[in-house]
Image (spheres, rainbow, N blue to C red):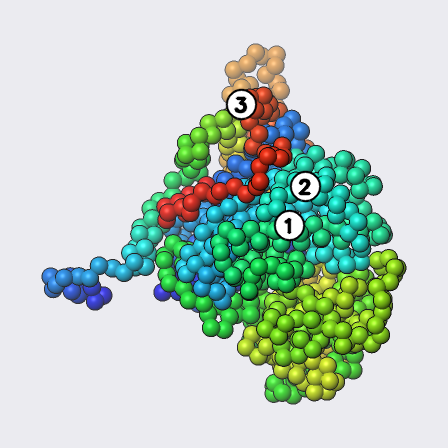
């Protein structure tokens, strides 16, 4: 048996994945356990779950692989600061300390979690190599072109290459700072949504607007080549050195400052969303065409955060040169953990690969599952009132009846999904025929923006009746959009001239709650192989109502991760307008719950590690919440040594100045005596000392960072620029036909031991 | 096990299959002790000929050392007097 553990962490979406003898045994994001949305911290709980799921202890893990190369990434970060210094100190002081604190210490973090049972060296794959592996190895193809596009990895922001048999080889790349992912994120920021989290909101907003800025973007912001490679005009952006994404020049070009998160969404923002969506689709189509021409392949595998843009994906499927396209459902950084583990198994160990007859990704149901008795115990512990419907058919029938009565159902069954989409294991379900349902779900349950559409889950065999999708085209992972079929429209409305939000509440079709303003829907096709329980529920609902589809939205509220455990689900059920909760065989009605049952307190975030290098990298005071025994011991020694040193100073200096160190030494010695004699005082003493010295600590740390930046980094950066070194490739090359660069060939086995 | 038995009986042993050989090679590599971060930095600078990064990395290593101290009980003594 060979077990490979893949890990992604420290940027966003930390995750762990375990591959045993080539089979994906478990994969899960840390956020589901920590309850912190897009949690980037080292995935301790996710790793623990993966090992438990496989029944392994740390000493049974053969290989641990990290999804990117930290030193290459640090190289890019430092080169970027050098290219712009003396600008960029604010970004430096916030970003760089986290390198010293955790990002360079993957080895230490792994050993902390796995303990002394794991003594081997770690492996490090490249960021886009991990994405490429996550796209190709679970795909149903023997060979395929591969395209990965995201914000940035080490240096690459987009890559293309070939997957064949057990090998993945990326041949070309577009390099930082020229990044399609960051371009999209810049507009996400400008339109008032959170970067790395709100991109899908921008995509949802796009159909409300008209792409009137698309030409401006293409003319002023990008030098786009016919093969999809491009360079950005960095004077419009601020992400290289600033704390925001866009510069003042960008704001002038698009008519004002960025929208504040709670401000009203104007037509201009909708038009910007539509414009950047149009440009993104154009670039991706060209990149896909380039991947096809380079590889000669008829199949395509996609991954990287940009591959979660299902509207662009659908255009590649419809208009691209490929017969078939497979997209990694966890296309973001979480999927990198899975890709890195599969890369070790197939590429480094040269284990043969044959495409899985059903679905190697297992419907992405790779997370935790809670046995029936645990669900019962959890519900009892919360004082919940529930009905046990042990017969599956009875449970499904009862749930379908409640859905037909226009109840909103929280549905938690089996293993949790890996990736950002709820696919029927942790979903909120409702009747898509109800014109009010979108508003009800958005405002009373999901507590989110009213423009955001909901996705339908439709029985596979009915997909082409409701959506304009070819019969052979399936979307089991909700990664493609389809237009609602003309036959489903009650009244054929001409495309009217009203703008954006005015069209949101139109009743477009027989399934208005899942029909977006442009008549599109992000479809999940449901079959009995991947998602059997959801399929049986849809069948029961169809038999009862004649409608084979339901709204399927993730089981969470705004800014929270999808629920993981029964207690998470129960808490979400109580705190929102969900009418019915179904967990495994247990059915709970909101009206049955006693008034004194209150929503359990959320688990909340883990306390951030103490120290001035933690979290925001420099703004935190050095106040540790709960000192460890080692810290307490070291502090005691510190007190003793400091008082001794002051005594020596007092004895050696001139007599008229002797009083100051002598009195300090006496004070410290008294403190030390109290510290040594009364163990109960140690914790409060250390905490008080830390609080008292925190301002000086903060000042010292800022001074140290400023000295490093202005006296070391800036002169080097300025000198390099004077001799013409531009690692940022800022000038467009009009004479060149492409910005794709040839990648270095894949490393040998020893290359994967290196962090660069 | 079968190969071991053959070897013990001095019978010809078939060469290991490619995946087996690769696994053994990788196993040997991951069993070697890690070189440490400073050595890895050095190898990175040498392989990429980025000597101009040396002063910056040294300054960052110093900051890193301060970070390690900050997480120990000595932090409160060090920083106020830096």
Marks 1/2: CA distance?
Answer: 10 Å
- Residue A222 has which mark? 2
Disc 1: host chain: A
Location of mark 3 (residue): A647
Discs 3 and 2 lie in a common subunit: yes
One can see residue A367 in this view: no
* Label 3 close to label 2 by CB (< 8 Å): no
Q: Residues within 10 Å of mark 3 (few under 14, many from 20)?
A: some
Looking at the image, which residue is at 73% across and 66% down? A520
Residue that numbered label 1 is attached to: A283
In space, the residues marked 3 and 1 are separated at their CA atoms by: 71 Å
Secondary element type, mark 2: strand
- Which of label 3 and label 1 is nearer to you? 1
**Residue A681 sits above or below residue A468 on the image:** above
Residue at image location 48% in from the left, 54% down from the top: A295
Pick the residue in front: A127 or A17: A127
Q: Earlier in the sequence, mark 3 or mark 2?
A: 2
Discs 3 and 1 carry the same chain letter:
yes
Marks 1 and 2 share the same chain: yes
Locate residue A676 relative to residue A685 in the image: left or right. left
Q: From what the image shows, is residue A615 above or below residue A727?
A: below
């Amino acid at each position: 048996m060979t077990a490979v553990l893949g890990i992604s962490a420290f940027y966003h979406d930390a995750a762990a994945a375990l591959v045993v003898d080539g089979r994906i045994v478990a994969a899960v994001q840390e956020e589901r356990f920590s309850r912190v949305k897009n949690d980037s911290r080292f995935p301790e709980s996710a790793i623990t779950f993966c090992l438990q799921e496989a029944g392994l202890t740390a000493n049974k893990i053969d290989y641990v692989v990290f999804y990117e190369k930290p030193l290459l990434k640090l190289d890019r970060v430092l080169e970027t600061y050098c290219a712009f210094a003396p600008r960029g100190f604010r970004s430096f002081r916030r970003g760089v300390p986290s390198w010293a604190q955790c990002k360079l210490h993957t080895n230490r973090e792994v050993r902390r979690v796995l303990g002394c049972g794991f003594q081997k060296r770690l492996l490090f794959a490249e960021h886009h190599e991990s994405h490429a592996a996550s796209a190709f190895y679970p795909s149903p193809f023997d060979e395929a072109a591969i395209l990965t596009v995201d914000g940035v990895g080490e240096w690459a922001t987009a890559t293309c290459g070939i997957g064949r048999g057990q090998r993945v080889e990326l041949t070309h790349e577009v390099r930082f700072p020229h990044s399609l992912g960051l371009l999209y994120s810049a507009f996400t920021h400008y339109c008032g949504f959170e970067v790395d989290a709100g991109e899908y909101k921008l995509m949802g907003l796009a159909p409300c607007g008209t792409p009137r800025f698309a030409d401006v973007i293409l003319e002023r912001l990008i030098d786009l080549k016919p093969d999809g490679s491009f360079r950005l005009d960095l004077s419009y952006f601020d992400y290289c050195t600033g704390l925001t994404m866009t510069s003042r020049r960008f704001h002038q070009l698009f008519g004002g400052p960025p929208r504040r998160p709670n401000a009203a969404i104007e037509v201009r923002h909708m038009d910007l969303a539509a414009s950047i969506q149009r440009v993104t689709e154009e670039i991706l189509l060209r990149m896909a065409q380039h991947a096809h021409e380079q590889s000669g392949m008829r199949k395509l595998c996609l991954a990287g955060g940009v591959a979660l843009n299902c509207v662009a994906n659908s255009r590649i499927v419809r208009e691209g040169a490929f017969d078939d396209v497979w997209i990694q459902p966890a296309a973001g950084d979480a999927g990198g953990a899975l890709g890195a583990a599969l890369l070790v198994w197939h590429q480094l160990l040269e284990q043969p690969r044959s495409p899985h007859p059903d679905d190697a990704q297992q419907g992405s149901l790779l997370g935790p599952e809670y046995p029936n008795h645990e669900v019962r115990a959890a519900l009892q512990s919360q004082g919940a009132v529930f009905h046990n419907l042990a017969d599956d058919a009875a449970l499904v029938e009862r749930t379908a009846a409640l859905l037909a009565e226009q109840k909103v159902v929280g549905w938690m069954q089996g293993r949790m999904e890996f990736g950002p989409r709820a696919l029927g294991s942790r979903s909120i379900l409702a009747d898509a025929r109800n014109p009010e349902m979108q508003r009800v779900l958005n405002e009373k349950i999901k507590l989110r923006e009213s423009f955001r559409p909901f996705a339908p889950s439709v029985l596979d065999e009915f997909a082409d009746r409701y959506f304009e999708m070819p019969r052979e085209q399936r979307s089991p992972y909700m990664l493609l959009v389809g237009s609602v079929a003309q036959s489903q429209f009650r009244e054929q409305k001409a495309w009217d001239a009203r703008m954006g939000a005015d069209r949101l509440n139109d009743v477009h079709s027989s399934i208005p709650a899942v029909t977006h303003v442009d008549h599109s829907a992000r479809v999940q096709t449901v079959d009995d192989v991947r998602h059997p329980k959801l399929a049986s529920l849809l069948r029961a609902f169809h038999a009862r109502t004649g409608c084979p589809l339901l709204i399927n939205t993730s089981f969470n509220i705004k800014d929270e991760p999808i629920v993981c455990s029964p207690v998470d689900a129960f808490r979400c059920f109580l705190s929102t307008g969900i009418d019915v909760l179904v967990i495994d065989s247990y059915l709970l009605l909101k009206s049955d719950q006693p008034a004194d049952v209150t929503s359990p307190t959320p688990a909340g975030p883990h306390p951030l590690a103490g120290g001035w290098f933690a979290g925001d990298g420099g703004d935190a005071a050095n106040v540790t919440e709960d000192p460890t025994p080692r810290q307490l011991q070291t502090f005691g020694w510190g007190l003793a040594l400091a008082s001794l040193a002051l005594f020596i100073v007092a004895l050696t200096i001139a007599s008229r100045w002797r009083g100051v160190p002598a009195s300090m030494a006496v004070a410290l010695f008294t403190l030390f005596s109290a510290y040594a004699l009364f163990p109960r005082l140690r914790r409060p003493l250390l905490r008080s000392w830390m609080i008292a010295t925190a301002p000086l600590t903060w000042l010292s740390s800022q001074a140290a960072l400023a000295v490093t930046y202005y006296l070391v980094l800036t002169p080097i950066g300025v000198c390099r620029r004077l001799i013409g070194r531009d690692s940022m490739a800022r000038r467009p090359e009009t004479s060149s036909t492409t910005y794709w660069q040839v990648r270095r060939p894949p490393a040998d086995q020893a290359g994967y031991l290196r962090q660069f | 096990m079968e190969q071991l038995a053959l070897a013990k009986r001095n019978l010809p042993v078939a060469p290991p299959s490619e995946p087996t050989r690769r696994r053994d090679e990788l196993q040997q590599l991951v069993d070697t002790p890690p070189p440490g971060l400073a050595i890895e930095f050095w190898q990175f600078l040498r392989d990429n000929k980025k000597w101009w990064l040396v002063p910056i990395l040294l300054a960052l290593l110093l900051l890193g050392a301060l970070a390690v101290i900050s997480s120990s009980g000595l932090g409160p003594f060090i920083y106020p007097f830096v």
